[in-house]
Image: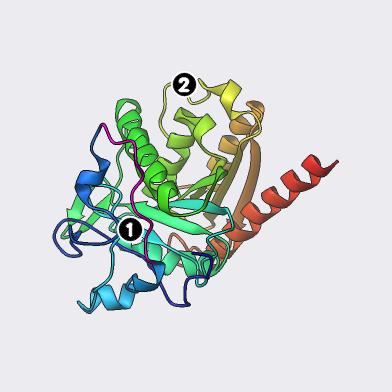
Amino acid sequence: MTDPLPTGHRIFDADGSRWVWANESPAWSDSDWGGGRDDEPAPIDFDAIPTHAELAAGMATGPVVSLLDEPHAIALPDVYEPGYAYPLLVWFHDEGGREEDVFNILPQISERNYLAMAIRGNVAVGERRASWSVDEAGAEALLDKLNEAIERMADQFSIHHERIYLVGAGSGGTTALELLLQRPEAFAGAACLGGAFPQLAHPLAKFRGLRGRRVLLATSLDCPNVKITDLVNSGRLLFSAGVQVGTRIYQQQGGSHASKMLRDVDRWIMDGISSAVRVSAQ
């Protein structure tokens, strides 16, 4: 299929209870991901995919995309072009958030530039809401889970594997940055919006892989998690390892992922892509 996805389509949360994977779907069934298969899943009929609003209203009749056997979500740009390799944003929600927040977050970053996915935090703070707490040992398990989801997503959607960015707010931003520090070769960079620097014994242990990676650190004058001095010190530490560090300081937080913060994430990523294109053309 070469036609763009119609405007308004957002995809899909499959958490085993609310938006349930349908085995009769023409896209694929859960068993398709078992071991020992050489053939690929059948292509998704993009025109049959329900919108987020249709899913929420119980009107879904087409295929629902499922990547993991736990709560997660995928969001597409307003018009999805299958022939274009999109940057992928992996969103880590703030405290008390959930994976579905990505449906509101992605349009505020950009309505056209990215694919996005999100999973739910590993610490429950209420019904279907969560936060993040990842120690160094737990980071490896989370990274393996993300790698599995990204690879399955890449089987059906066009992803630029060298432009995968981890983006998060609050404890989600801390988690995004920690995962980059733990496995820098897997990602282009991370944006930490109002999140503290990870409490790692050796944050630059993977310094060879960190060289050339990009990090955006953002805080505000009233942010309770990150003081300006902390942000500056974190930036200096990352810069010493060869990381390309961008910093943003805002007057007021207005929520851990205020609209201006999110718009600046788009500018920061696009500036990095443009710079890489200019260098490769020389």
Residue bearing mark 1: 73
Residue 85 within the magenta-colored segment of the rendering: no
Stretch in magenta: 36-45
> Residue at coordinates 33% horizontally, 58% vertically from top-left?
73
Q: Is residue 169 visible?
A: no
User: Which of the pair 130/150 is nearer the observer?
Assistant: 150
Q: Is residue 225 left or right of residue 113?
A: left
Farthest right residue? 282
Q: Return the residue nearer the eye: 247 or 28.
A: 28
Q: Position of residue 78 (x, y in %)?
A: 50, 72
Residue 138, quarter of the rendered image: top left
**Labels 2, 1: front one:** 1
- The disc label shown at residue 202, or none: 2
The secondary structure that most of the magenta stretch takes on is loop
Callout 1 environment at 10 Å: few (<14), some (14 to 19), or many (20+)? Answer: many
**Residue 151 rendering spot, x and y as whole percentages:** 41, 42
The secondary structure type at the circle numbered 1 is strand
Quadrant for the C terminus in the image: top right
**Residue 30, position in %: x, y?**
21, 48
Q: CA distance from mark 2 to mark 1?
A: 32 Å
Disc number placed over residue 184 in the picture, else none: none
Q: Tell me what residue is drawn at x 52 percent, y 60 percent.
A: 82
Q: Is residue 97 above or below residue 30?
A: below
Kindly tell me whether residue 204 is visible in this rendering: yes
In the image: residue 192, left or right of residue 155: right
Against 242, is 95 above or below?
below
Identify residue type, mark 2: His
Amino acid at circle 1 = Ala
